[in-house]
Image (spheres, helix red, strand yellow):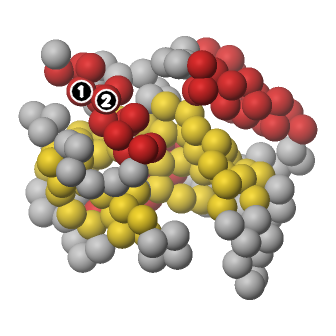
Amino acid sequence: MTLEQLLRAHVASDDREEADRIAMLRLATELEEPTSRDQARAHFTASAFVIDVECARVCLVEHAKLGRLLQPGGHVEPTDESLEAAALREAAEETSLELDFHPVAPRPFDLDIHQIPARPDEPAHFHLDVRYLLVGSGEPCAGAAWYAFGEAGDGSVARLSAKAAAYYR
């Protein structure tokens, strides 16, 4: 499935996500290499919202550059066969957990556009984040930890928690 097909097929859960989906669809066709971090103004990234099997905890990582607790994820590498593969690779690298895609959640699970602030080596730009819901088990590595739903993270994490919890009601 192409990036454009993936974005066209995704059903947004609210108006904000739909606005991001439409903008991402436009950028998927405008950007010369949409998944390359060499695209200065914006590029697609992949992340994973990792929950435990009971959907009671979420595994978050301490993002050193942003100073926030976030879901694992990052840039798409040239060797990644898909955004799904990139999200799974990033989550495995950043958490060291045993991971599987959630059995019934859509793929992708969520779409989000967020700005990355300028740093000395790169200008401010946007991450066009394609997010997947994963189920993890085990003990996370240093820099990652399990947190009870609602106890850590910011508004973005809270939104993802609410979406994930809907599969367990």
In percent of width and height, residue 65 lies at 52, 75
Q: Any mark on residue 165, and which?
A: 1
The residue at 18%/57% (across/down) is: 146
Tell me the crowding category of disc 2: few under 14, some 14 to 19, or many 20 or more residues within 10 angstroms, Cα based. few
Q: Identity of the amino acid at label 2?
A: Ala
Q: Nearer the viewer, residue 80 or 144?
A: 144
Residue 51 occupies quadrant? top left
Residue 94, visible in the rendered structure? no
Residue 19 appears at what percent x and percent y? 68, 25
Above or below, comparing residue 91 to residue 101 in the picture: below
Q: Amino acid at mark 1?
A: Ala
Give the residue drawn at x 22%, y 71%: 141
Of residues 13 and 51, the one drawn nearer to the viewer in this rendering: 13
In which quadrant is the N terminus drawn? top right
Crowding at mark 1 (Cα within 10 Å: few <14, some 14-19, many 20+): some
Instruction: Report the Cα–Cα distance between label 1 and label 2.
Output: 5 Å
At 40% from the left and 35% from the top, the residue drawn is: 159
Q: Is residue 134 left or right of residue 125?
A: left
Instruction: Find residue 22 and report its horizontal and vertical position in percent.
Output: 73, 24
The image position of residue 142, as x and y in percent, is: 24, 76
**Which residue shows up at 48% across the image and 39% down it?**
131
Q: Secondary structure at mark 2?
A: helix
Q: Quadrant of the C terminus?
A: top left
Query: Which residue is tagged 2?
Result: 162
Q: Is residue 55 above or below residue 8?
A: below
